[in-house]
């Protein structure tokens, strides 16, 4: 009897520990998703069609089939530009490019296929930004061009956060009072404290336990883009009530590319402080 009670207590303790560990883990995603529905000229759905996407920089391909309702969903797609190919029996091949996928994007497409032979190809060439219709989060993507071209003091990417709606820079007094304890904090969102923000690098939490700011400050040349969600973030982010900054580092491709830079900061070049 005593052994049975001890075993029950051990199992109970194990379940509690498992639940605690489960709630302490967060699953953030630095990728995107392309989903949609396929229809014929009369508006009826097309099941069993082959839907493929090809990453234009790496050539990586992902293929699925539309379900009985004509819907498809391609998940866990790295950011970048894609070519979308749809093939179905008795319909012309549908090709669309480029589709630009940013971090945490969900591109929702409604495609009307044309009756015809598989040898016939319908091409759509447009890189117009698509309206976000699948999510409720409020935020903005800062691209590589903005990161490299806009002036930054100390090459700190987080300074671009103040370009977001609802963001305000830290006051000079707060920064000076905090000193080194404010090194990882750059802005406040919607009136919340700077410690309320959440930072991610390639989906991994990037939080300094000392000041609740970002722990790692990647050089701006290594950043592909980042998105700051200022409101309505999906539940998988969790952990903080402020903004969620999801940063994605630059990756390789089939073409040789890179960057070379030298950064010198010396106070002898500073203007006089009157």
Image (tube, rainbow, N blue to C red):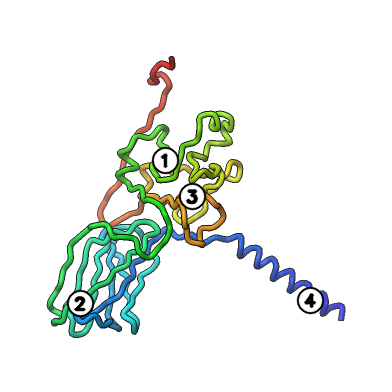
Pointer 3 or 2: first along the chain: 2
Residue designated by label 2: 113
**Alpha carbons under labels 3 and 4: distance apart:** 44 Å
| Location of residue 258 in the rendering, given as x and y in whole percent from the top left corner | 30, 46
Circle 2 or circle 4, nearest the eye:
2
**Alpha carbons under labels 3 and 2: distance apart:** 40 Å
Q: Are marks 2 and 4 in contact (CB under 8 Å)?
A: no
Q: Are marks 3 and 1 in contact (CB under 8 Å)?
A: no
Residue designated by label 1: 162
Residue plotted at (30% across, 60% down): 131
Closer to us: 34 or 204: 34
Residue designated by label 4: 7
Q: Is residue 105 left or right of residue 121?
A: right
Q: Is residue 135 above or below residue 11?
A: above
Residue plotted at (34% across, 56% down): 102
Pointer 2 or 4: first along the chain: 4
């Amino acid at each position: 009897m005593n052994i049975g009670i001890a075993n029950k207590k051990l199992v109970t303790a194990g379940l509690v520990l498992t639940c605690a560990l489960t709630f302490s883990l967060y699953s953030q995603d630095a990728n995107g998703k392309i989903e949609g529905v396929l229809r014929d000229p009369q508006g009826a759905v097309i099941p069993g069609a082959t839907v493929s996407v090809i990453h234009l920089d790496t050539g990586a391909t992902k293929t699925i089939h539309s379900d009985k309702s004509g819907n498809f969903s391609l998940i866990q797609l790295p950011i970048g530009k894609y070519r979308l190919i749809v093939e179905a029996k008795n319909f012309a091949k549908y090709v669309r490019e480029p589709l630009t996928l940013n971090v945490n994007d969900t591109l929702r497409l409604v495609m009307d296929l044309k009756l015809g032979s598989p040898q016939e190809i319908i091409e759509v060439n447009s890189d117009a930004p698509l309206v976000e219709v699948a999510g409720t989060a409020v935020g903005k993507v800062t691209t590589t061009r903005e990161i490299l071209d806009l002036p930054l003091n100390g090459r700190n990417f987080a300074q671009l956060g103040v370009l977001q709606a609802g963001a305000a820079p830290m006051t000079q007094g707060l920064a000076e009072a905090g000193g080194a304890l404010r090194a990882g904090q750059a802005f406040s969102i919607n009136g919340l404290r700077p410690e309320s923000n959440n930072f991610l690098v390639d989906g991994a939490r990037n939080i300094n336990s000392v000041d609740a700011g970002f722990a790692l400050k990647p050089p701006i040349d290594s950043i592909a883009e980042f998105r700051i969600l200022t409101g309505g973030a999906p539940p998988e982010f969790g952990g903080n009530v402020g903004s969620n900054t999801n940063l994605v580092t630059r990756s390789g491709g089939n073409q040789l590319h890179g960057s070379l830079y030298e950064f010198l900061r010396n106070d002898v070049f500073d203007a006089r402080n009157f």
